[in-house]
Image: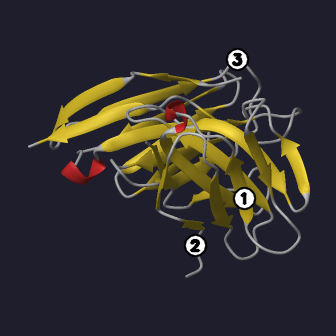
Amino acid sequence: QQPVQSPQAVILREGEDAVINCSSSKALYSVHWYRQKHGEAPVFLMILLKGGEQKGHEKISASFNEKKQQSSLYLTASQLSYSGTYFCGTYSPGGYQKVTFGIGTKLQVIP
Amino acid sequence: NAGVMQNPRHLVRRRGQEARLRCSPMKGHSHVYWYRQLPEEGLKFMVYLQKENIIDESGMPKERFSAEFPKEGPSILRIQQVVRGDSAAYFCASDAGSNQPQHFGDGTRLSIL
């Protein structure tokens, strides 16, 4: 089942912070985060494997709450280069053992 | 180039023709995934393959679409008798295991005249 992302879209000024949420109705083994810039392929950002784990990539970090079946992506002091669509992917036990992607959150950073 | 290779990058077909999209996974990757993306929309899962096996084709339309990942050579996504609605970007991704990061190719932009 597809995870739910929120918000669907957000506009930030350079230097502002943002949070993108991803939640699932199923128990999760892991959460994956990707970013896709306009006209390009999605690029892997990070994977969170344990409940409560936080990882970071430049000024982008994420948390994973296994009990709540949700993850949040934190973008700190946003830069113009952060613009793009952010996808979370969830991996759950059982089924076909593949990552299922949300519909994405479109982030636009303006000067 | 050690990345996921897709070709062609752009493909133009007339209605009724066949489209063949190719994907060579990263070296060492045994899983291939195909996704379809319409402009300003998300990634729609189509099919998940391992060498010589289709693991999950729940996202594939029942007719005209097929996929394979032979023992030798690239994975192929085949669309027969294309229609205007098939116009989209088709991305291939590969990984080394079910819970590993997926690496995406640059996609094939399919246009139907």
**Residue depth check, mark 3 versus mark 2: number of the one nearer the observer:** 2
Specify few, some or many for label 1: CA neighbours under 10 Å numbering under 14, 14-19, or 20 or more: many
State left or right for residue B8 relative to residue A17: right
Along the line of sight, which residue is nearer the eye, B88 or A93?
B88
Of mark 1 and mark 2, the one earlier in the sequence is 2
Image quadrant containing the N terminus of chain A? top right
Give coordinates of residue A62: x percent, y percent. Answer: 49, 42
Residue in view at x 77 percent, y 26 percent: A27
From what the image shows, is residue B17 above or below residue B102?
Answer: above
Along the line of sight, which residue is nearer the eye, B79 or A80?
B79
Disc 2 residue type?
Gly
Name the residue furthest bottom: B1
Report the residue marked by disc 1.
Answer: B76
**Residue depth check, mark 1 versus mark 2: number of the one nearer the observer:** 1
Query: Marks 3 and 2: CB-CB under 8 Å?
Result: no
Specify few, some or many for label 3: CA neighbours under 10 Å numbering under 14, 14-19, or 20 or more: few
Report the residue marked by disc 3.
Answer: A25
- Which mark is drawn over residue B3? 2
Can residue A88 be seen at all in this image of the molecule? yes
